[in-house]
Image: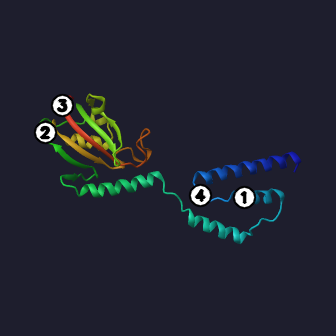
Amino acid sequence: MTRRSRRSDKSSVTHLAINWAGQVLGKQLEFDAELFARGIADVLSGRDPVLNAQEMEAAFEEQRKKNPPAVSVAERNSKDGEAFRVANRLKEGVLEMESGLQYRVVKAGSGAVPTLKSKMAVHYRGRLIDGTEFDSSYTRGYPVVMTPSRLIPGFRMALLNMVEGDTWEVVIPPQLAYGPSGAGQLIGPNQTLIFDIELLEITGD
């Protein structure tokens, strides 16, 4: 191996070490910078490391116990959403469809029933289970004309079971919303969504 290639190898190892240290700090794990630097120096110089293989494995195992793998955002959202829906199911007036969609009739109308191709004027407000609002026609100040066939499954199911004049509060599980992909900056993966939906008028087919 040439001197230049040895320098290149050492540079690569150094960059890897710096990158790994940055990841450790970013995850807020316990980290002894002095021992870490000494270990890298020992490896690069060919000296025997401070810890033998058995001691290293024991140290790694202790570190794993102190810092268990983080639960993914999608998994946490899924569990939080499921807990919310279980509690919501027990509230007075809440009904649940076979699909898992939950709804509560806030105000009952008496008008026509929409079809999959109907155009309708709708007011709605969407929020997360922590109350964060991510969209609202009320905030914009005017209703939206929409067609059920172009909506997420949960919203579509709700509208097709409503009549003109109805106002529902709807809880949509992730598989009927945006699933593991999420949407935009506010809706994360596997999030349960809550919508207030007011079917104002069916404007045509």
Disc 4 or disc 2, which is closer to the eye? 4
Q: Which amino acid type corresponds to the residue marked 1 in the rendered image?
A: Glu
> In the rendering, at what x and y percent does residue 56 appear?
69, 67
Q: As displayed, is residue 121 above or below residue 84?
A: above
Residue behind mark 4: 29
Q: Which amino acid type corresponds to the residue marked 3 in the rendered image?
A: Glu
Looking at the image, which is closer to me, 60 or 113? Answer: 60
Residue behind mark 3: 201
Question: Which badge, 1 or 3, comes first in the chain's sequence?
Answer: 1
The number of numbered badges drawn on the structure is 4
Q: Crowding near pointer 3: few (<14 within 10 Å), some, many (20+)?
A: some
Pointers 1 and 3 in contact (CB under 8 A)? no
Lateral position of residue 95 relative to residue 59, left or right? left
> In the rendering, at what x and y percent does residue 71 appear?
48, 57
Seen at 24% across and 33% down, the residue is 122
Residue 119 in view in this figure: no
Seen at 31% across and 43% down, the residue is 153
Q: Which amino acid type corresponds to the residue marked 4 in the rendered image?
A: Leu
Lateral position of residue 83 relative to residue 164, left or right? right
The part of the image, by quadrant, that contains residue 42 is bottom right
> In the rendering, at what x and y percent does residue 17 appear?
71, 52
Q: Helix, strand or loop at disc 3?
A: strand
Question: Which badge, 4 or 3, comes first in the chain's sequence?
Answer: 4
The outermost residue toward the right is 2
Q: As displayed, is residue 152 above or below residue 175?
A: above
